[in-house]
Structure formats: C-alpha cells, structure tokens
C-alpha cells in the first residue's frame, strides 16, 4: 500500500517515452503533467488538433519549459483507422515505448455508433484501446528487453463501475446493449478494460519465479480506478443519474491532479512492485479487491479472442499480427 504517494516521489523519467490517450483533458492531462515534470517524452493523443495544441501550450507554460517534449498524436478512438495511422506515425519517430496509458473514455453519452459499427462506449473505452495496445505490443516488448524489469508498463483506466455490469458481464451476443441504459454500456466497457489487463498480465506480464532473468522483457500492467474525479466525464452522468448528481453537488469528487495519482503510481513509481502487475488499483495507489468476472480466466481469454477475431475480420489486424 502506498497512500502517501505524490508526484515528487517518482524517479527521473528523462529518456523514457510514454503515450497517453485522452491527454487533452481531465485525468489524462494531469497524468501528462506529472510525467513531464519528471522529464519524460510524451505523445498526447487527442481527436481534436486544436485541443491538443492548447493542452500542450498550457502544459509547457505550467512546466515553465517551452521545449518540454510533449507531442500531439492525432487519434479518434471512434475511428479505428486513425489508430493504425497514429501507430505508424509513432513508430516512424520512436524506437522505444516505456509506458502506454489507456485513459480516454466516455460515460453515459447518448446512443451512437462508431465509423466501425460498434456502440460508442464499447469502441471508445475498450475496442480502440485493445487495438492500440495490440499494435504497440511489439515495441513495448522490444523496449522491455533492453530495460530493467518493471520499466515498461501498460496502465488502463477502469472504474469501480465494472462491478455494476449486468447479466453475463460481457454480452457477447449483443455488445452494443441497445436496449439497456447508457450507464450499463459504460459498466460493460469498464469491465472489459479490467479483463483486458488481466489477460495482458498472462500474456506479457511477469510470470513469477526467480528464473525469469530478473524480469527483463516483461511488461508490467495495471487496471486503475481513479475514484470519483471532477472532470468533463461526469457531464452526462450528472444529468442521467441521481447518485452522480448528488455526489458531485456535495463536492465529493477529487480534483483531476489528485485523480491522476493512481495512474502515475502504476505507470512509473518504483514502489509499484513486480507482484502487483495485473492488479486492480484503487485510490490512491492501493491494490483493490476483485471478485466475480474480474477473476474469471475463461472470460478474460474469451474476450481477448473475441476482440482479436473481430479486428482481424474487419481488417485491422493482418494475418501475421500476433500478440
Ligand atoms: N472522472 C471520474 O470520476 C472517473 C471515475 C472512474 C473512471 N474514470 C476513467 O478515467 C478515464 C479518464 O476520464 P476523465 O474523468 O479524465 O474524463 P474527461 O475529462 O472527460 O477526459 C476524457 C478524455 O477522453 C477523450 N476522448 C473521448 N472520446 C474520444 C475519442 N473518440 N477519441 C479520442 N479521445 C477521446 C476526451 O477528448 P475530448 O476532449 O475530445 O472529448 C478527453 O481527452 C476514463 O477512462 C474514465 O472512464 C473516471
């Protein structure tokens, strides 16, 4: 447990490269602020070029460093082809990736289908992040092979709302949940984020045991619930949920800089230990307890394979792509 964690306790991150989705606002923006304050190079993913430019300008001014290495990486999670393009752009510029932060999200937005035919929560929060991770796993693994154990990590933002998913947790036969409430669609997508991390842990995380060549080559992963944080995310929740409205009116949400601490701890702190990889993290910087679907290995693997098949069928993964 590390509830006294602060940005100051992070190590120097000069020379390390990070990608953060949803970097122009809220928790993602503050995550970038924390990483950049320690010298990291960051690729700020955003769907709006003007929002990306504004965010980078304000971050550099806060850091009092007009040359802080924060670069825009255009990406609209509602359009999977933009993820392929962003990965190509990134790989043309960098040969290392030390941290991937899957942060962008939407909650309780009105019904919408993506360019690729998926419901908006399912695509923005989950499918798009699965594809981004899949395409970046080779560079993450290569980087990990050149670094000390635990330097290379993937952090995915989930939410305590995963526990409120309904029925089978993941409704494989109707993932769009057209007949359910927007909050149900959010809960399912956040459960998928947690299941994704658990399966990543099995595929690329530490396996345990001393014989692992001191962990070289392994990628540490974590699913982070940031708590209730005052950001733009709650705009729709507050209008659709009595609970959301009440909690926010009572000022129960943390400011975004505090909301980003769990992510920063999981992605870069030396106090995040090897045997924490694969964990569900709750505020602040503590290991959370999981039950039911979150611990169901068959469900984790089924979701991975289902998503891989979908993306291959839609042409976003080549036949030679294997994670
Ligand atoms: N805030 C909370 O209380 C809370 C609680 C639990 C979990 N979380 C999780 O924390 C994460 C960050 O949320 P937040 O509170 O920081 O929300 P936020 O302030 O609303 O920020 C969300 C970010 O995601 C981006 N985004 C949304 N749709 C996108 C798309 N199609 N393509 C590219 N970027 C897109 C937004 O960009 P635009 O500015 O262009 O919309 C924004 O940068 C989410 O995954 C959320 O589920 C938050």
Image (cartoon, rainbow, N blue to C red):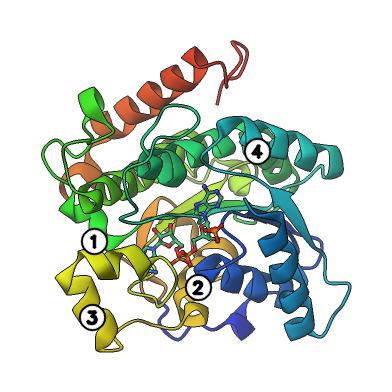
Q: Which of marks 3 and 1 is nearer the N terminus?
A: 3
The percent position of residue 141, horizontal first and vertical second, equals 65, 38
The percent position of residue 310, horizontal first and vertical second, equals 43, 20
Q: Nearer the viewer, residue 85 or 182?
A: 182
Q: Do the residues labelled 1 and 4 touch (CB within 8 Å)?
A: no
Does 105 appear above or below 219? below
The crowd level at tag 3 (other Cα within 10 Å; few <14, some 14-19, many 20+) is few
Which dot, 1 or 2, sits closer to the camera? Answer: 2
Q: For marks 1 and 2, give the CA distance.
A: 20 Å
Pointer 1: what residue?
Answer: 289
Q: For marks 3 and 4, give the CA distance.
A: 41 Å
Q: Nearer the viewer, residue 91 or 29?
A: 29
Residue labelled 1 has its Cβ within 8 Å of some atom of ligand 1 = no
Pointer 2: what residue?
Answer: 260
The percent position of residue 270, horizontal first and vertical second, equals 58, 69
In this figure, what is the number of numbered marks?
4
Q: In which quarter of the image is the N terminus?
A: bottom left
Report the residue that reaches farthest toward the right.
Answer: 67
The percent position of residue 31, horizontal first and vertical second, equals 58, 69
Write the residue at 23% across / 80% down: 247
Q: Quadrant of residue 211?
A: top right
Report the residue that reaches farthest toward the bottom.
Answer: 250
Write the residue at 38% across / 46% down: 193
Write the residue at 72% across / 50% down: 73
Pointer 3: what residue?
Answer: 247
Q: In which quarter of the image is the C terminus?
A: top right
């Amino acid at each position: 447990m590390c509830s006294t964690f602060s940005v100051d306790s992070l190590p120097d991150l000069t020379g390390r490269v990070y990608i953060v989705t949803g970097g122009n606002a809220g928790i993602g923006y503050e995550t970038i602020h924390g990483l950049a304050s320690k010298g990291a190079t960051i690729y700020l993913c955003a769907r709006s070029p003007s929002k990306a430019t504004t965010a980078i300008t304000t971050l550099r001014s806060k850091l009092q460093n007009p040359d802080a290495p924060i670069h825009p990486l255009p990406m609209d999670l509602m359009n999977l082809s933009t993820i392929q393009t962003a990965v190509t752009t990134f790989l043309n510029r960098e040969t290392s990736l030390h941290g991937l932060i899957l942060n962008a999200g939407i909650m309780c937005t009105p019904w919408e289908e993506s360019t690729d035919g998926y419901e908006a929560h399912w695509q923005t929060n989950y499918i798009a992040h699965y594809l981004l991770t899949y395409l970046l796993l080779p560079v993450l693994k290569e980087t990990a092979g050149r670094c000390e154990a635990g330097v290379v990590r993937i952090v995915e933002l989930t939410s305590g709302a995963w526990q409120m998913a309904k029925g089978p947790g993941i409704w494989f036969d109707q993932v769009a949940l057209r007949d359910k409430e927007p909050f149900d669609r959010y809960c399912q997508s956040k459960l998928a984020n947690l299941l994704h991390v658990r399966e990543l842990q099995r595929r690329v995380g530490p396996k345990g045991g001393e014989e692992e060549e001191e962990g070289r080559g392994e990628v540490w992963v974590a699913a982070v619930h940031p708590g209730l944080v005052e950001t733009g995310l709650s705009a729709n929740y507050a209008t659709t949920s009595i609970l959301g409205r009440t909690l926010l009116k009572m000022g129960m949400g943390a400011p975004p800089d505090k909301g980003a601490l769990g992510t920063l701890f999981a992605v870069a702190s030396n106090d995040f230990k090897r045997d924490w990889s694969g964990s569900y993290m709750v505020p602040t910087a503590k290991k959370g307890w999981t039950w039911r679907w979150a611990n169901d290995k068959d469900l984790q693997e089924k979701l991975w394979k289902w998503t891989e098949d979908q993306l291959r069928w839609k042409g976003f993964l080549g036949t030679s792509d294997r994670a």
